[in-house]
Amino acid sequence: MEQPPGFVAQGEYGKMCHLRKSLYGLKQSPRAWFGKFSEVIQEFGMNKSKVDHSVFYRQSANETRKMEAKPYSTPMIPNVHLTKDDGDPFDNPERHKRLVGKLNYLTVTRPDIAYAVSIVSQFMSAPTVKHWAALEQILCYLKRAPGLGILYTNHRHAQIECFTDADWAGSKADRRSTTGFCVFVGGNLVS
């Protein structure tokens, strides 16, 4: 970069300026900004994704301490009925709520765990050790099948199909019903 007219000091001709930060509108400005942003966000404990370098995440593998556990083949043990009075209260209800929230978010792309997560989310106000064990089983199932998800294929139609089901007072504690539904668009599950 050459010195602007009128800025050149007497006897200092032929010298250049060194630009210390990027200027708005330059081709490299976004890259420089993202480099600085990456440094700052990583100082706060975030990690950069190896797949997409614009995605940052906070490592939470120690949230449950179950990463070394044996993987399960199902997200929930069949014919197990959880109730609100299932044993001793869990010692950290906030941790339970955080994990249920994370799993609830994950059901958007993993419908195979949606039923199990809906069952354990019914006990967020007063979780017990048995409810926590059910959450750990979901995590162990996810460890076994990390690549499963929703697969969309082109069936060459946009037909909408909806299905619903209810268990008609299936809860033994308060006789409430549990209802579920699924919506297919073009033969692909969307909800």
Image (tube, rainbow, N blue to C red):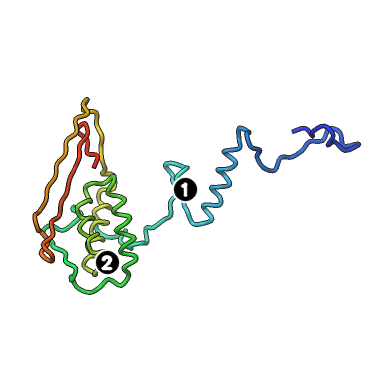
Q: Earlier in the sequence, mark 1 or mark 2?
A: 1
* Closest to the observer, 5 or 48: 5
Residue name at image x 47 percent, y 42 percent: 53
Q: Is residue 6 left or right of residue 43?
A: right
Q: Residue furthest right?
A: 11
Residue at the (27%, 56%) spot, across then down: 139
Tell me: residue 33, above or below residue 66: above
Q: Tell which of 137 and 121 is nearer to you.
A: 121
Quadrant of the image containing the C terminus: top left
Gap in angstroms between the C-alphas marked 1 and 2: 34 Å
Q: Residues within 10 Å of mark 2 (few under 14, many from 20)?
A: few
Q: Nearer the viewer, residue 17 or 185?
A: 185
Q: Is residue 156 above or below residue 127?
A: above
Q: What residue type is disc 1 on?
A: Lys
Circle 2: residue type: Ser
Q: Residue beneath label 2, please?
A: 125
Say which residue label 1 marks.
Answer: 48
Q: Secondary structure at mark 2?
A: loop
- Is the residue 127 above or below the residue 34 in the image? below
The percent position of residue 12, horizontal first and vertical second, equals 87, 37
Q: Image point 28% across, 46% down: which residue?
A: 108
- Report the quarter where the N terminus lies: top right
